[in-house]
Image (cartoon, rainbow, N blue to C red):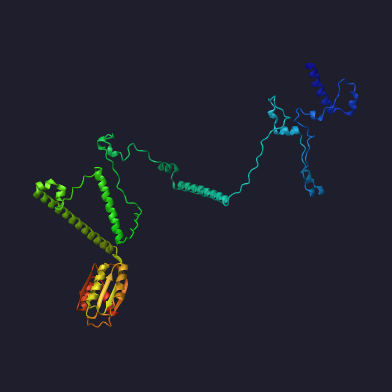
Amino acid sequence: MGSDSRRDYRRGYRDHGRSSRSRSPDRQTDNRNDKRVEIAIHPLLMGATPEVKTASLVPKAALSTVAANIRAGSKDSVLLQRPKVDRVDALLAVRPPSLARGNPYFDRILPATGRSHRPKKLEFKEKGAFVAEAEQIRRDEEWERLRREVGESLGQVGLDTEIIADLLVEEQVPTVEWWDEPFLDERGLPDFGRVNNLIQRPALLPPPIDTIVPPKPLMLTTEEQKKLRRQRRLAEHKDKQEQIKLGLLPPEPPKVRIANIARILGTQSVQEPSRVEAEIRAQAQKRQQEHLDANLVRHEKAKEETAKRTSDRRNELMTNVPVAVFRIDNLTLPQWRFKVVKNAEQHELTGCVIYYEHFSFVVVEGKAAAVRRFKHLLLDRIKWTEAPPDTMADVSQNRCVLVWEGVVGRRSFYRFDNWTFSSEIDARAYLGKFGVEHYWKIAKDS
């Protein structure tokens, strides 16, 4: 088809569309003699592209309305009907005409592709979220109110906020720090003569927490202790032998005695027997003296440790000391006196026992367990009404009474003594030196 025929076809297409819209039935009969053939266009060919359809051909679903409103004939039911909007007008609403200006490729008939709307997820607010937000808003408002009041008060006093801001500015870093000044000379230059290769380490401070107390060792029997001692000494001996083999320790000199002199020294003992015998006796005496010195050191060390433990136990009971006071009607038998004094010393108790012609007075102070054991001795273990067969004293009415027991603020005695007084005045005077004269009165009245 040539260019002229294509042009004529397009012109006829436009004229046909214009005449189909504006022509009346009367005018159609008048133009029958027109040479152009008028052929109706199929509805599917009305659009510019196959994708575009006429709005009349697209099926429209009727919107559901309330039956009650339809029966009542309400005017509001008209609002529920789907509005009829032309497709071209809708496209122009989506795509404004300004886009078509200056764009020769813009086609307003094509459908617009808008952004798809993603539905939001259903989210629940945690309990107290809005309350916390309201509290934060109230705190901000309160802070703003306080800041405004402080600013107003400073203005009334006459203080300038700029001056206060200048006072809060941090100081500038000095040219020389205070810890570098001892190593500078008068000109401010470093003096390397005062610097050495030594490092000053701070003194170690004890930790703020108590040291971990080691667990108590397991109590062993005598046989188990001997067995462990043998095993320990055997392991030490093997270790020493290994070090001698490796050359770390010098070999021990042989222990020469008169009995094995010929076997160890051999011909030397035959050539100079007197000198060898004197050396052997001197070595044996030296070994014996070293053994005695070691035993003495161990003995003194044990005595020092015992005295230290005793002193520590006494010092820790300088306050809140348990005390017990006893009255014994008859304490004349030596066996009973020995038991009282010896048990007081063994339990590291302090106090005294006073022998008086009418009764005997005993006061002890020390640890609670020691006082309890001593009280058990006097009240339960010793049978005060049973005398040995060889004694003539009558002890059938004898008794021992605990007249007072309690806790005092500090220790009154520093050792356990026994005294015999013939008069009550002397006994009171002796107890008065320690400030416990009232004990005698309590014992006498009981």
- Using the rendered image of the protein, determine whether residue 403 is visible from the camera's viewpoint: no
> Residue at 28% across / 53% down in the picture?
232
> Which of the image's four quarters has the C terminus?
bottom left
Q: Nearer the viewer, residue 220 or 189?
A: 220
The quarter of the picture where residue 99 lies is: top right
Q: Nearer the viewer, residue 81 or 235?
A: 235
Count of residue discs:
0
- 4 with respect to 289 (left or right): right
- Using the rendered image of the protein, determine whether residue 231 is visible from the camera's viewpoint: yes
On the image, the x and y values in percent for residue 336 come to: 24, 75
- 196 with respect to 137 (left or right): left
> Which of the image's four quarters has the N terminus?
top right
On the image, the x and y values in percent for residue 44 come to: 79, 30
On the image, the x and y values in percent for residue 443 come to: 28, 77
> Residue at 27% across / 53% down in the picture?
233
Work out whether 54 lies above or below 362: above
- 352 with respect to 74 (left or right): left
The quarter of the picture where residue 347 lies is: bottom left
Q: Nearer the viewer, residue 271 or 219?
A: 271
Q: Nearer the viewer, residue 229 or 204?
A: 229
> Residue at 91% across / 25% down in the picture?
29
> Residue at 14% across / 47% down in the picture?
266
The quarter of the picture where residue 344 lies is: bottom left
Work out whether 202 lies above or below 4: below
On the image, the x and y values in percent for residue 282 come to: 12, 52
